Image: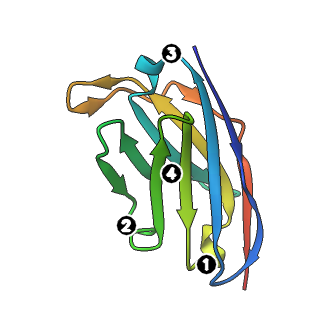
């Protein structure tokens, strides 16, 4: 089992910055892949950024160059640094964990409760 708790959401103006944190606990093997997802009202959940424990990262095109995913393994914490925020970044952001399977990530199985990010124009 893996437990995930997000924090750091809030309200900012367009162009502002926020840093989300996700505190993780539980079986480390089930956290070989970590990711941030978001869901805006009336829209499907989408992947924002992903990271492997070996350090490989990838991002959605909509956030490339603005968001940075990182993790501190000593603190068991996942981060999402969000800069140059836009109103379209407004959503509930979720942290998720999956087991790594060779070079791939299995389906995300563990989810946090989410944290709201609101960007005003």
**Quadrant into which the N terminus falls:** top right
Q: Is residue 81 above or below residue 75?
A: below
Choose the circle earlier in sequence order: 1 or 4. Answer: 4
Q: Are marks 4 and 3 in contact (CB under 8 Å)?
A: no
Mark on residue 64? none
Residue 44 shows in the view = no
Residue 87 shows in the view = yes
Left/right of residue 119 with respect to residue 79 in the rendered view: right
Q: Are marks 3 and 1 in contact (CB under 8 Å)?
A: no
Q: Secondary structure at mark 1?
A: loop
Q: Is residue 12 above or below residue 70?
A: below
| Viewer-nearest residue: 99 or 47 | 99
Mark on residue 46? 4
Rendering coords of residue 49 (x, y %): 44, 53
Left/right of residue 34 with respect to residue 18 in the rendered view: left
Mark on residue 27? 3
Residue shown at 72% from the left, 55% from the top:
8
How many C-alpha atoms fall within 10 Å of the one at disc 1: few (<14), some, or many (≥20)?
A: some
Mark-to-mark CA distance, 3 and 1:
35 Å
Q: Secondary structure at mark 2?
A: loop
Q: Which residue is the extreme one toward the front?
A: 74
Q: Which residue is mark 2?
A: 61
Mark on residue 86? 1
Mark 4 or 3: in front is 3
Mark-to-mark CA distance, 4 and 2:
11 Å
How many C-alpha atoms fall within 10 Å of the one at disc 3: few (<14), some, or many (≥20)?
A: few
Residue shown at 47% from the left, 73% from the top:
66
Mark-to-mark CA distance, 1 and 2:
14 Å
How many C-alpha atoms fall within 10 Å of the one at disc 4: few (<14), some, or many (≥20)?
A: some
Rendering coords of residue 81 (x, y %): 55, 62
Choose the circle earlier in sequence order: 3 or 1. Answer: 3
């Amino acid at each position: 089992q893996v437990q995930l708790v997000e924090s750091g959401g809030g309200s900012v103006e367009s162009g502002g910055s926020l840093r989300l944190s996700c505190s993780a606990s539980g079986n480390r093997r089930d956290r070989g892949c970590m990711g941030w997802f978001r869901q805006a009202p009336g829209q499907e959940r989408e992947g924002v950024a992903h990271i492997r424990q070996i350090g490989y990262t990838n991002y959605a095109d909509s956030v490339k160059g603005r968001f940075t995913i990182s993790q501190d393994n000593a603190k068991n914490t996942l981060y999402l640094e969000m800069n140059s925020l836009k109103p379209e970044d407004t959503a509930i952001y979720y942290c998720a964990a999956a087991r790594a399977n060779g070079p791939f990530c299995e389906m995300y199985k563990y989810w946090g409760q989410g944290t709201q990010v609101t960007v005003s124009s």
